[in-house]
Amino acid sequence: MTQTYAIDRRSGISAWRQIADQISRSIASGEYDARGMVPPEAELAEKFGVNRHTVRSAIATLAEEGLLQPVRGRGTLIAKRERLVLPVSRRTRFSSGLGEQSGDVVIRLLSSETVLPEEEVRRALRLGESEKVVMAKTLGLARDMPISFATSFFPAERFPNMADSIRATGSVTRAFAMNGLADYVRVSTEVIGRLATSEEAEQLNLSNSAVVLETISINADLDGNPVQFARTIFAGDRISLRLETAQG
């Protein structure tokens, strides 16, 4: 995918920030992979229609964020980050899926409340119109780095203490076990690539307009009863999703 070079002078966002975000998206899309470097400052300045100082500010910002590495006499290198790989299969588990790659993996509860769900969630969980859900926002961390930001919904009648259990265990799987569900399976997973919202960028410590992967998933017990509906946002430069078709 080739990057479109354009600055919106009426957006209220500084030119250097827009350039930084567009360079970040180009890196995420693989536009610069062949050479492993971003174009020279003079070339970027011409393409964006700005002076070199503005481009230099954008590059300096991305260097502070760990995405670029200026090298004297060579130019600006892309600081390659090893992506973690999360297998997405019938028994997807966040901690076990990443544990061998990153060591300490934990889910941190950010907030929770018991609410009436929106229509999409209600239908996915097969709930009646008056039935409530426990809504839990969580942050997934590996190597103390945020890699996922999720909003999960659990049937409140069956799992009234789910949020407290996630807080206590740091794991959705262990939280289910505390609430009487020893095993569950993934029913469906939808994957969408898009730009991060401001909340997602803040939670995942991303630059504005960073590329993220969003999964919309449904988990069920072994009798086929839905137990979780989740929207999970993954930092696109830190994790890859590997879809596995083998049943297990």
Image (cartoon, helix red, strand yellow):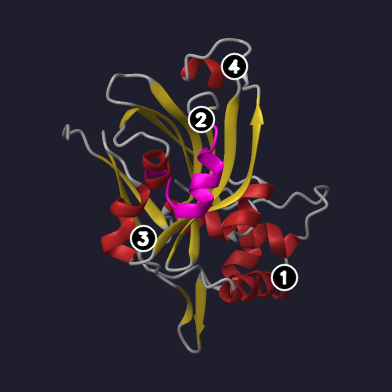
Query: Mark 3 is on which residue type?
Result: Arg
Find residue 224 and report its image quarter.
Answer: top left
Where is mark 4, residue-wise? 131
Where is mark 2, residue-wise? 154
CA neighbours of label 2 inside 10 A, class few (<14), some (14 to 19), many (20+) = many
Task: Tell me if residue 64 comes above or below residue 232 in the rendering.
Answer: below
Query: Mark 4 is on which residue type?
Result: Glu
| Marks 2,3: beta carbons within 8 A | no
**Badge 2 or badge 3: first in the primary sequence:** 3
CA gap between label 2 and label 3 equals 30 Å
Instruction: Please report the bounds of the magenta region as a residue range.
Output: 159-173
Q: Position of residue 36 (x, y in %)?
A: 39, 69
- Give the number of the mark in front: 4 or 3: 4
Q: Report whether residue 26 is seen.
A: yes
- What secondary structure is found at the residue carrying circle 4? loop
**Badge 4 or badge 2: first in the primary sequence:** 4
12 relative position to 51: left or right: right
CA gap between label 4 and label 2 equals 11 Å
Check residue 83 in the rendering and tell me which mark sits there, or answer none.
3
Where is mark 1, residue-wise? 54
Q: Count every numbered label the image shows and give the total.
A: 4
| Marks 1,4: beta carbons within 8 A | no
Magenta-colored segment: predominant secondary structure: helix
Query: Mark 1 is on which residue type?
Result: Thr
- Give the number of the mark in front: 3 or 1: 3
| Marks 4,2: beta carbons within 8 A | no
6 or 17: which is nearer to us? Answer: 17
